[in-house]
Amino acid sequence: MSYNSFMYLFVFLVVAWLLWAFAPQKWRPGVLLGASLVFYFASTKRYIVYILLAAAIAWGVGLLLGRLDALQVDTRPVLPPDRRKPFKKEVAALKKMAVTGGVVAMAGILLFVKYLPFGARVLSQLLESLPGSPVFTVPALVQPMGLSFFTLMAISYMVDVYRGSCKAAGQYWQVLLFLSFWPHVVEGPFDRYGALFPALLDPPPPSYRNLTFGIQRIVWGLFKKMVIADRANMYVKATFDDWTQYSGAATALGVLLYTLQLYAEFSGCMDIVCGSAELFGVHPAENFRQPFFSASVGEFWRRWHITLGAWLREYVFQPLILSKPMQKFARLCRDKVSPAAARQWPVWAGLGITWALIGLWHGAGWLYLLYGLYYFALQWLGELAEPALLRLLPNLPAWRRTRPYRLWQVLRTFVLVNFGMLIFRSNGVRAALDMLRSLAVPYEGSLLIKLDARDMAVLVVGALILFGVDWLHHRGHQLRSELAARPLALRWAVYIGAVLSIMIFGAYGDHYDPAAFIYAQF
Amino acid sequence: MHTIEEIIAMIEEVKPGLHPAPEEELVKSGKLDSVDIMSLVMALTGEFDIEITPLDLKEENFRTPQAILAMVQRLEEE
């Protein structure tokens, strides 16, 4: 069931909201769980077993961790003083074993389903130079909807309970509701149990504000998806799938439109899902914060797919740097190289591993690895060049505070991100390199590829509205609250105008080929 | 006992061009990002006899040079 389908918007959401709104408060979490399971089952049928299993593992590990904590609190004070420290150590070791087991089990399911065929292919390629080497082939397994999302959310739940930053859920259904909550199970955001669950368990009563704000946000998401993203898809599909036919300006426009498509689509999907959750008084984590006003690629990734970056930072990058092998590596660097190397090299190693994982999270293949390492290279080179730049240009810190320099940084980041988008969307590493080369070859044909002048005009106006709204948010405006304070006639004119623009300019019907939500495939 | 000057000198090494005052905000303002913070953590664990865990990597512990000093002193006492 797609988030922009008639079935979702006008049947599923309406029925779920009515049942939720008219149910007694204590039954409301049950209604949300029932609706989430219906949504998930309707989309995946028997593969629902994966999410049931993930919830069982996460719940079991959380429960065990909670019991161990309780045991420590109850037992330690009554022990003889000389036994207290060893007892604390024993409990800590058991907790570590429990959380490690849970994380390995969850990561194992993800690796097995998503990465096993790729791993077998890589192994075969590595061994093919040896005489009589075996060829490993593993058929691709069906990947249940949202596997990459609910697996990571289950891991974060277990680690948060282990670290004591959230309380373990007492009941299985509570973890199942958190993982399967339909607004975030398909494309995220990666919510945290401690932040989201209180609202799922005890939501505020239905309100006019939540209802209208939720609907507004859903309409805005549909505008981005149907007016901008699905229209841009026509051009993007042609230039990326038949990349050998195009070059120069046609390829460059294809890349630009893909950037626009992906942003409009992914952020539009987040608007639809956050708007859906808002109807029920729940506020999932935000995934975008005007990313195209970023001054560096590092900043871009703190404002684009925010919850994935935060997840990897908190559960991979930081623990990796603080791990014993990395601390050992730091000591080796200090003894053999310099204190500066001890400070930098382990961090760069951790950064490289994290970027590789960000790439591979998007898909099992060399292209995605290249995509992650492209951003690692940019960030690493930026770090390396910084001291030399400061020596060469002593006024650089002062320039960086000026508006023209900030504009240059934003433009530079935009161009670099577009090269990343080229890699990300291309049909393999070779196609990406071909497309990069073809950018320098002039294109003689018409730039109206699969789209007519009217479509292009709609895209330009749509992009101006999208980035105009982003700019206002960037300047600190709260547009929905500001609109809510305007006279009734103006508000309704805006709402009706938005709905009509989707109906009139939406890219649907025989002439168009709307794309499935891109991130739902990861 | 460590001093605020030692902490500021470490921040200046990690982030060339940055010369923060003891109470200057570092995290929300974007003066230190997650990579800078981890480099600073490596410098702190290398120079001082402390162990920093993922639980210590909270914004409040790195908000200002003074907050970093307070964290170092707390970890040394533990």
Image: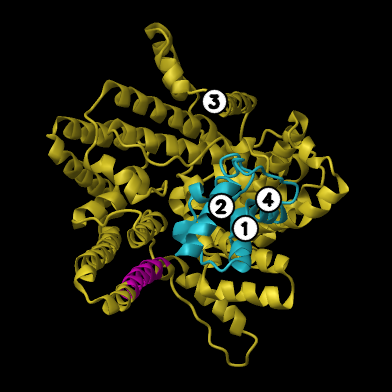
Q: In the rendered structure, which amino acid carries the disc numbered 2?
A: Ile
Which label sits on residue A243? Answer: 4
Q: Residue furthest bottom?
A: A131
Which amino acid type is marked by label 1?
A: Leu
Helix, strand or loop status at disc 4: helix
Residue A98 in the magenta stretch? The answer is yes
Q: Secondary structure at mark 2?
A: helix
Q: In percent of the image, x 48 and y 23: which residue is there?
A: A478
- B46 in magenta: no
Q: Which contiguous range is marked in magenta?
A: A92-110
Q: Which chain does the residue under circle 2 lie in?
A: B
Tell me, yes or no, whether dots 2 and 4 are on the same chain: no
For label 1, the residue is: B40
Give how far apart the Cα atoms at labels 4 and 3 are: 41 Å
Viewer-nearest residue: A241 or A349: A349
Q: Amino acid at mark 4?
A: Trp
Q: Which class describes the residues within 10 Å of circle 1: few (<14), some (14-19), or many (20+)?
A: many
- What whole-number distance in Å separates the C-alpha atoms at marks 4 and 1? 45 Å
- Mark 2 vs mark 3: give the one in front: 2
Classify B75 as above or below A290. below
Q: Are marks 2 and 4 in contact (CB under 8 Å)?
A: no
Could you say where residue A19 lies in the image, as x and y percent from the top left?
A: 17, 34
Q: State which chain disc 1 sits on.
A: B
Which percent across, then down, holds residue A371?
Answer: 62, 57
**Residue A476: numbered disc:** 3
Mark 4 vs mark 3: tell me if same chain. Answer: yes
Q: Which chain is cyan?
A: B
